[in-house]
Amino acid sequence: MLELQIFPAPPSEPPVQGVVILGRFQPFHRGHAFMLEFAERWRLNNCPELPLIIAIGSANRPESLMNPWSHEERSNIIRHWIESNDFETTPSIISIPDIDDPPNWVSHAESYHGEAGVFLSSDDSSLELYSNSKWRVVKIPMEERDRFEGWRVRETARMMSTIDDEDAVLEVLSPTMPRSVVDFMIENGYLRRLAFMGEGGEPVG
């Protein structure tokens, strides 16, 4: 079993309490965009004094077809998408390493995103973990959840990774990924690497 190194390290100062949304964002797709827009609306209507904190999980996973992009790259992608959308304030983006220990996940994550604020998610198991740790939790309603499963989006992106016609790539990927994100990933070579990461995707994450 792979022993995961714990990086990045948590901040030296205790993080402020906030409205937290957690994901792997491998890659950032329209399901994630909906979740962030929902979280920002909920924050403004219910806790405008709290910051929106976007937590990127699996920050320490080695590069693979399941984890093609580093946490720094995912942060850049999300930041680029935020800049092209109307957010009241700029959310904080942080990265959290995995520990493969679900019962202790929340206490581990709190050292990165702060203690009991509000946790929003569409994932029932994550909501249960945070609720059991005395967080206020809010379930995000998700339609077409199967369409936005990470492995499906990654596999479609992998199939397009050797195509040089950018218009064709945009046409195929834009139904599941924001167009601005696809443009950014093409410009920065984030899609091309998928061609060298194996023969097919797996139905995971």
Image (cartoon, helix red, strand yellow):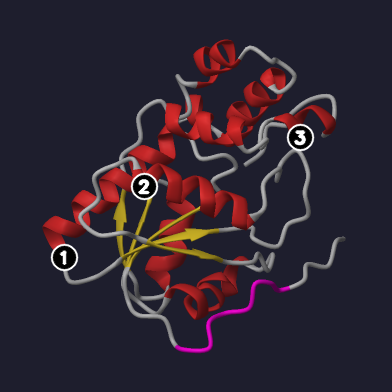
Identity of the residue drawn at 82% across and 34% down: 197
Sequence-earlier tag: 3 or 2: 2
Q: Does residue 6 lie above or below 41 as drawn? A: below
Distance between the alpha carbons at the discs numbered 1 and 2 = 18 Å
Q: Secondary structure at mark 3?
A: helix
Residue placed most toward the observer, 42 or 204: 42
Q: Does the magenta run of residues contain 117?
A: no
Picture quadrant where residue 130 is located: bottom left
Q: CA distance from mark 3 to mark 1?
A: 40 Å
Q: Position of residue 87 (x, y in %)?
A: 25, 50
Q: Amino acid at mark 1?
A: Pro
First in sequence: mark 3 vs mark 1: 1
Report the residue that reaches farthest toward the bottom: 13
Mark 1 lies on residue:
48
Corner quadrant of residue 32: top left
Q: Which mark is residue 82?
A: 2
Disc 1 or disc 2, which is closer to the eye? 2
Q: Secondary structure at mark 1?
A: loop
Q: Amino acid at mark 3?
A: Arg
Amino acid type at image mark 2: Ile
Residues in magenta, as a range: 6-13
